[in-house]
Image (cartoon, helix red, strand yellow):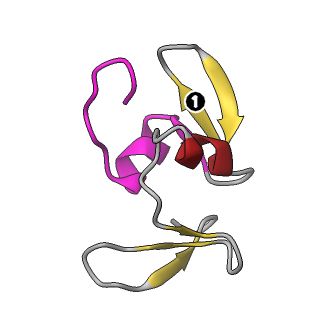
Amino acid sequence: ETSTGEKLSLESAVKKGLINGNNSQVYDSVKRTVIHLPEAIKQSLVENKYDHQSGSITDNRTGEQIPLRTA
């Protein structure tokens, strides 16, 4: 959450509408803009757990690779 500096789980970020799993977009609540996930990772808005080749995210708890749409 860029406006508070709080780290959120992927699930929480999706539920809050900060990440759109359908199109891989991330909402920057400070700049009030929407950017694509790879750019959000470059800007350190999202921790780099995203695998560009498979389009999946690694679950920190289980190590399982989850497709972004499922996450």
Q: Residues within 10 Å of mark 1 (few under 14, many from 20)?
A: many
* Magenta region includes residue 66: no
Q: Could you tell me residue 28's position as x and y percent?
A: 54, 25
Q: Could you tell me residue 37's position as x and y percent?
A: 64, 48
Q: Residue at x 41, y 86 (%)?
A: 64
Report which quarter residue 63 is drawn in. bottom left
Residue behind mark 1: 27
Residue 71 lies left or right of residue 11; in this view the side is right
Which residue in the rendered view is the most extreme toward the top?
Answer: 31
Residue 48 sits above or below residue 40 on the image: below
Report which quarter residue 15 is drawn in. top left
Residue 10 sits above or below residue 71 on the image: above
* Magenta region includes residue 12: yes
Q: Quadrant of the N terminus?
A: top left
Residue 39 lies left or right of residue 46; in this view the side is right
- Chain part drawn in magenta: 1-20
Q: Residue at x 67, y 72 (%)?
A: 55
Q: Main secondary structure of the magenta part?
A: loop
Q: Residue at x 43, y 35 (%)?
A: 16
Q: Residue at x 25, y 76 (%)?
A: 61
Number of numbered callouts drawn = 1
Residue 26 sits above or below residue 27 on the image: below
Q: Amino acid at mark 1?
A: Tyr
Q: Could you tell me residue 52's position as x and y percent?
A: 68, 70
Q: Secondary structure at mark 1?
A: strand
